[in-house]
Amino acid sequence: MNQIWIITKRELQAYFDSLTAYIMIVAFLGFSGFFTWLFGSDIFLVGQANLQVFFSVSYWSLFFFIPAITMRLLAEENRSGTLELMITMPVNYFQIVGGKFLATLLLIVISLLLTLPYYISVASIGPIDHGSVFSGYLGLILISSAYIGIGLLASSMTNNQIVSFLVALLIGIFFHFIFGMIAGNMTGFFGNLFYFLSTSNHFESISRGVIDSRDLIYFLSITAMGLLGSVYFISRKSA
Amino acid sequence: MDISVSNLSKVYGQQRAVDDITFQVKTGEILGFLGPNGAGKTTTMKAITSCLAPSAGQITIGGKDVAMDEEAVKHHIGYLPENNPLYEDMYVIDYLRFVAEMQHIPKDQIDGRIIEMVNVCGIQKEKHKKISELSKGYRQRVGLAQALIHNPDVLVLDEPTSGLDPNQIIEIRDLIRRIGRSKTVILSSHILAEVEATCDRIMIIHKGKLVGDGTAEELRRQSKGVGLLRVKIEEVEKEDVEKALKALKDVNMVDLEGEVFVIQAKEGHALAREVFNMCVKNKWVLTELTPVETKLEDIFRELTMN
């Protein structure tokens, strides 16, 4: 556990030292703020005291931003050879991947914490359902963890950051809407299967305030598969 | 801590990068790996540091099996990989602190160790810089500091002086020699003079196999180049001299290089006396009779040129 935390600290510091974190935060707040408050079907147009608008905007912006911040994580270490050095230290692959996962998730949580003024503003305008806000944020964290898992997996497979980014986006697109689209055109077993695989259905039910164990299992198992896959790919290099 | 490598092999597809290598290194010994590019030096070192799993064979460090007891062994190894990978975007001090924490150095000793490493490796002036801003020589020192920070018993250095200027090379060499007294050091290089100057023992690897093992002196003795003499005789026809030299009973080979004959004795024989007596008998004027010192370069070429 200690080793994971040391790596988490280093990665988090690397995010801030390399400006990635600031760019991520500014871009995320700018993007979600713009569409939540100023443009399109914003909160004033919807006219309800809830954060549904913000959650659906974040659902999309995180989908793009997460591959951009995870692409470096293992691909760069593969390229420069630092991973090789790291593994000769008293640490194992699970701890390395775990530390990087945790650091990225913390960065997302920091970004989300900075949107709390949205919640406070809306709560001061009208009666807000605190439970659904909480579950909406939980949904965003869960979906982030699933995409970080996918991003790490893509990053572990290559030593080229661009390849890593595109692979993560490609895998992400399937979960994000292609499975949902396929499910809409199918019935029976495959219809249900693709419906279950689609992120949007799970996210929608959580962001409406329904925390179902199936949704939790869905997001956590994507995360776990991503992390295990990453461990597999980086450990294969030393076989 | 002694290192023992037995029957180590590593196969990549069809290629045998390391082919059945066996050797031991004792505490206080500095072992130099020599070999042409792609000979298997780096692969062997990676196997010792447990960042590469061997296809066959066993490696023990201080009696513990590297494959079975990875966690216990890792604490004792300091490793400087081939291209000295570092986290470019970190500051030198932060990086050393990170490595120190990873190596389980107790919190209250970390600052002390960092200061010591900064002094030992000579990076005082650069310690507050980002690693990406450092020149190659200083990067190399940071890599060395990283390998030494937890005071490991075993030090594995893959080309530690590559990219350094001559002054730095001598400094790093002295540093390795100083550290090497109480540790087990394995270093690789393709600079022969460096290996000769730094190492107690030299191992030459070629195509994954061990082709030479011993001190520089021992390698010289094993080499074919032993017993070479340069002979120069004035005012006599070359053909006559060549004939006379070939007639000597312990001569193995006679070669004419310009004005000078290079002759080689049969194994275990010395020629100087015979040559001298021959000249006296024929009343020839002998102006040069010197033994040829075999260079490590020649031994290296001889062992790795087939």
Image (cartoon, grey):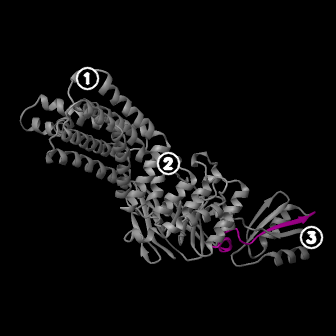
Residue type at mark 3?
Trp
Residue B59 rendering spot, x and y as whole percentages:
44, 71
Task: Name the one closer to the observer, B120 or B111.
Answer: B111
> Is residue B215 magenta-colored?
yes
- Provide the secondary structure element on which disc 2 rests: helix
Residue B284 rendering spot, x and y as whole percentages:
92, 70
Disc assigned to residue B91:
none
Disc assigned to residue A80:
2
Residue type at mark 2?
Ser
**Label 1, residues with CA under 10 Å away: few <14, some 14-19, many ≥20:** few
Question: Disc 2 and disc 3: Cα gap in Å?
Answer: 67 Å
Mark 3, residue position: B284
Left or right relative to B191: residue B47: left
Question: Disc 1 and disc 2: Cα gap in Å?
Answer: 50 Å
Pinpoint the chain carrying mark 1: A
Compare marks 1 and 2 and give the one earlier in the sequence. Answer: 1
Mark 1, residue position: A44
